[in-house]
Image (tube, rainbow, N blue to C red):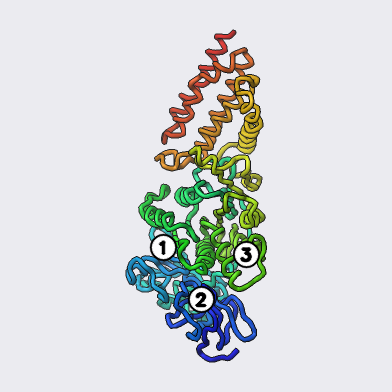
Amino acid sequence: MANDSKGKIIRVSGPVVEATGISVAMSDIVRVGKEELMGEVIKIEENSFIIQVYENTTGVRPGEPVTNTKLPLSVEVGPGLLGSIYDGIQRPLEILEKEMGHFIKRGVDADGIDHKKVWDFKATVKKGDTLTESAIVGTVQEFDFTHKVMLPNRVSGKVAEIKSGKFTVSDVIGKLEDGTEIKMSHFQPVRQARKFNSKLAPAEPLTTGQRVYDVFFPVAKGGVAALPGPFGAGKTVTQQSIAKWSDADIVIYVGCGERGNEMTEVLTEFPHLIDPKSGKPMMERTVLIANTSNMPVAAREASIYVGITIAEYYRDQGLNVALMADSTSRWAEAMREISSRLEEMPGEEGYPAYLSTKLANFYERAGLVETLNGEKGSVTAIGAVSPAGGDFSEPVTQNTLRVAKCFWALDAKLAEKRHYWSINWLNSYSLYHESLRDYFKKNADKNWEAKVKELMGILQEEDALMEIVQLVGSDSLPENQQITLEVAKIIREHLLQQNAFHEVDRFCPLQKSNDLIDLVFLFRDSASKALEAGVPAREILATKGQYEIATVKLEEDYTKILSKTKKTIESEMEELIKKYK
């Protein structure tokens, strides 16, 4: 192709534009049409090239100009990211609203970080120091968070000069001996993972404060969790609760192709949330990326990469980052639409043949790593999947399962029963139990693993017994099985079920979960002892101590009620045993 400064459009098909007349490389960002819409080169042919445009192409026509920036799609990273709300290509929505009102116009650019704000930079290196890629050159105080200013990937050398003081992110704060300028911000290509030294085996859970996850299906820091479920099962609320209450240092929430009302709820609620750990606004450790279902599909496809690139940036500062992708199904649908317009050979259900590769490459960027600068940080990816009709056999769910070691299967029937979180405990699983064994032994209970297995065994036994109960009723079961059903009911209602809107129950520490488990086993063991002593099951089931377990989980200072409940359960069973002796 020619090397002229401008090419021209020869075909337009939705977000896909074909152009010719200039030399381009794969993934180059180009400006399309008279309004200079942003697009990315995704295919190069002999005499033309294909662009996916991140904005609405209505009104764009053949013959309009195309200009090559010769830069890949990148995000600007540095001080000022936290507390921001972006669209799918890192344009701050607050800035766009000030310039244009409530409706985003086409062809508008905005800096990802405020270039006018002044930061107090403190250099941690000196002249003559040899710096490697991603080396930390200094710090900036951002809210309560010490932001570590780093060199970009692919930049290294000896420090020729460096200075502390008050600067904007675009000011030059130092130079390397080869003349490379050092600034507080830099651009990071989104489709290339940031480099690191090595991946480490996960050894610590992402504590969410939600019992069903922390106890039964934990995800490790640096792990991957899939959250599939039909419409209305609670995917978005689940991710929002994990974002609010997890012990991650930084939260990146990507609303990818979600309904506008759901994203509005996130955007209006998050700025008013108080972080339970610090007592400060939740937004001080959060970055939101909003790309609703009515926005262009190409930007939806890019939003996931923008989110994980920002997550990797904070990971390289030695932090634990939780990335919420809601939902990867909408991301896959965007890929399917673009693929069909490129006339590529479709795979299963019309998705591109490379769907599994794209999903694997994305989730592979999660992990616990030793960074190039010697820090240890993690990115935990939690991807919601929205299978049509709740069919878990569809391609996006199945391909996600191949790479996710934690599977949280949401169940519409449980949601209809108002059982939240509506995680189906028989279909869900976590493969992180073994790697997290030592952590739970140390921080919860030395017999934690055996306890969890025993709880799951009771729930599985209940599932088998329910087939008989539905035919002949529970009274026809042997008395020991009637006790098993009651214990399973306590597990379901007092452990698995949790009220996200209750001031206390919305967050449950690991030790409290362990104490609740001990109460369940105390009732089970006391009931079995009474049964062996000849006490009828109906009288055991009529005791009140088991119902006090519900009050324990709703009390903030629960230790007094805990000991009282233990005494109630034990004394009631002892009285029954005396009665029937």
What's under tag 1, amino acid-wise? Answer: Ile
Q: Position of residue 419 (x, y in %)?
A: 50, 38
Quarter of the image containing the N terminus? bottom right
**Marks 1 and 2: CB-CB under 8 Å?**
no
Determine whether, in the image, residue 263 is placed left or right of residue 330: left
Query: Is residue 135 shown above or below 574?
Result: below
Residue, disc 2 = 39
Determine whether, in the image, residue 474 is placed left or right of residue 275: right
Query: Is residue 289 shown above or below 231?
Result: below
> Is residue 201 among what the camera can see?
no
Quarter of the image containing the C terminus? top right
| Residue 358, disc | 3
What's under tag 3, amino acid-wise? Answer: Lys
Q: Nearer the viewer, residue 33 or 266?
A: 33
Mark 2 or mark 3: whose residue is earlier in sequence: 2
What's under tag 2, amino acid-wise? Answer: Gly
- Please state which of the two labelled residues, at mark 1 or mark 2, is closer to the viewer: 2
Query: Is residue 511 shown above or below 267?
Result: above
Q: Nearer the viewer, residue 564 or 57?
A: 57
- Please state which of the two labelled residues, at mark 1 or mark 3, is closer to the viewer: 3
Helix, strand, or loop for circle 1? strand
